[in-house]
Image: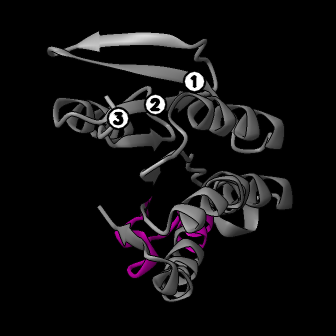
Amino acid sequence: MENQKVALVTGASSGIGKAIAQTLAKNGYAVYGTSRSAHFDTIQENGVAYTMLPLTLEDEDTIERAVQYVIGLHGRIDVLVNNAGLGYAGAIEETTAQEAQAQFDACFFGVVRMLGHVLPHMRAARSGVVINIGSLAACFPVPFQAMYCAAKAALFSMTVALRLELAPFGVRACVIEP
């Protein structure tokens, strides 16, 4: 359908991402979810269908392939939901720099990579919505989750600036903090 809105949802294999993908599909969107283990699978549940694409936030090539797949089919992405991520738990002093970097790669730099591939299309269309899934932990840090909290705080601050940068182009951005 030409007027059908198109959504790309990272981390849609379970949890919040899966619920978002199902809800958007139920509301008439053409939905493309992503997962590390996806293989262009069609998911049919609860009377709705959406397609799962392979994508790893740390791998720029998989991001480019997924975005180009959707653009090739529809010519646009109307909604980008950056949901994928992970959470390391442990004391700060016992967290390695590699674990901290992996946390930021998944919850912050992966979003930056997604934006780098999707935003040029949204700006050219002068429309679109970016929804970043953050966490209340960005504002209310908890013990033994410091790196997750820090990554979500960075995501929040970046999204606030992003919203201001995109406004002249008709693209909206927000962060939801469950």
* Quarter of the figure with residue 120: bottom right
Disc 3 marks a residue whose amino acid type is Glu
Which residue appears at 30% of the width and 37% of the height?
Answer: 4
Q: What residue does disc 2 label?
A: 32
Depth check, front residue: 1 or 173: 1
Depicted 161 relative to depicted 70: above or below: below
The residue depicted at 59 percent of the width and 77 percent of the height is 154
Mark 3 neighbour class, 10 Å CA radius: few under 14, some 14 to 19, many 20 or more: few
Residue interval drawn in magenta: 130-151
Lower position in the chain sequence, tag 1 or tag 3: 3
Residue 132 lies in magenta, yes or no? Answer: yes
Disc 1 and disc 2: Cα gap in Å? 7 Å
Q: Give coordinates of residue 50: x percent, y percent.
A: 36, 21
User: Residue 2: which numbered mark, if any?
Assistant: 3
Position of 88 with respect to 24 (left or right) is right
Q: Earlier in the sequence, mark 2 or mark 3?
A: 3
Q: How many marks?
A: 3
> What numbered label is drawn on residue 53?
1
Q: Amino acid at mark 2?
A: Tyr
Residues at discs 1 and 2 in contact (Cβ within 8 Å): yes
Residue 48 % position (x, y): 21, 18
Across and down, in percent, residue 75 comes to 55, 40
